[in-house]
Amino acid sequence: MAAEQHAPFPSEYDALSLAIAMYDAEDARIERTNGRFESLFGYAAEELRTLSPGRYTANTYRFSAADFAERLRDAAGGDPQQFPWRIKRADGELTWVRVSLSAWDGGRDAHVLAEVRDITEHYAASRRETLFWRVLRHNLRNEANKLVGYAEAVLRETDRDGLREAGRKARATALDLGTIATSVKEIQQAAAQSETHRSPRPAADAVRDVIAVLEPSYPDATFCLEERRPMWVRVDAAFDHALRHALENAVCHADESDPTVEVTVGPSPNTGRVEIRVSDTNPYIPQVEVDALDTVSELTTTRHGTGVGLFVMQWCVESLGGELTFERREPRGNRVRFYLPPQRRPGDPPSSDP
């Protein structure tokens, strides 16, 4: 029986561009794969058979390994499943895929055929389309309406001080429009960057450089950097954009005139990825802003954020194969986490860790 379980698919399956695996629905273990499945997940077939879904599921993604196992059982019972899934490759990179599960008709009970497609490019295109409509329908339109309102106030005013105030508001709103345009440009740059533009760097050095650029603009703010363990990342300008937005948000939304922003760099205790944590003591980030990052949900007039800064952060971090999360601190404050795939220091031998 063991030999039958571990028998490979026919060699013709390796010519497919579709990743295929056969699962035992009882314990959610893989029994067979084709070559495309191995290359997509980054593991050899022998190792895949020893891993539970939790090993190759992004641990901070809302779809958990337990959910995957439940869908396997549903498929084995005759209820086909189809869903997006964020996998974690062997090298720590996160990738979006679409999974189709159906009962295996090869004469064996409780077995499921999994067909997995890499949808990273499709997902990126969808995110760009969502951002376009978000900016067009909400941000730019709303800010333009403010400009119209302030201009009308100028026309109605006869008091000089009032004219000056309306003029200042019109100028501030115009600057906001410029900031939005800059944010969109940063996202477009992140989407267009290729692997060749990235370079390996000590994570703490990459953070330190961004802080150094910001400090002259915020002389009253204090940025405290703690490196818990030296780690390396492979980054480009997208990293700078994302971290700059996180740090500026922490400074600009502070109640005090001399805010302190804490930045911690080290390994994630759960995954071993590089974790860059930005902590403040500000009022909580509005939940509507965080919810708006869920691009699966339709943007409506009653559910949208007021800016694209968080979207820039998420897009840029994900373009690097990483992940962005938000946490509320007690009794107040926010904690923003970047999770990035760890890289070997140039010249170091490959790790023998599993």
Image (cartoon, helix red, strand yellow):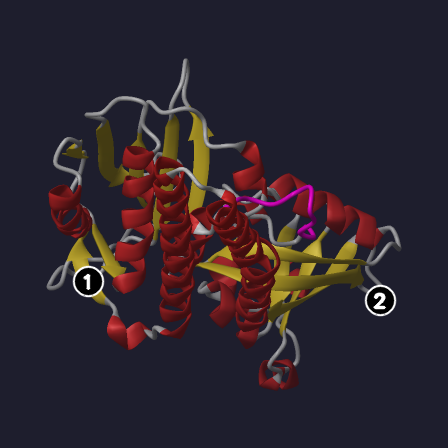
Magenta residues: mostly which secondary structure? loop
Q: Position of residue 318 (x, y in %)?
A: 43, 57
Q: Position of residue 245 (x, y in %)?
A: 33, 47
Q: Position of residue 239 (x, y in %)?
A: 29, 56
347 or 218: nearer the viewer: 218
* Residue 280 sits in quarter: top left
Instruction: Let me know if residue 6 appears in the view.
Output: no
Q: Residue furthest right?
A: 78
In the picture provided, is 151 more to the left or to the right than 339? right
The residue shown at (49%, 50%) is 155
- Name the amino acid, label 1: Pro
Numbered disc 1: secondary structure: strand
Between discs 1 and 2, the one toward the N terminus: 2
Circle 2 residue: 105
Q: Is residue 205 above or below residue 160?
A: below
321 or 52: nearer the viewer: 321
Q: Which residues are magenta?
A: 297-306
66 or 199: nearer the viewer: 199
In the picture provided, is 231 more to the left or to the right than 9? left
Query: Which numbered mark, 1 or 2, is in the foreground of this view?
Result: 1
Crowding around mark 1 (Cα neighbors within 10 Å: few <14, some 14 to 19, many 20+) is some
- Name the amino acid, label 2: Asp
Circle 1 residue: 200
The residue shown at (45%, 63%) is 43
Q: Quadrant of the N terminus?
A: bottom right
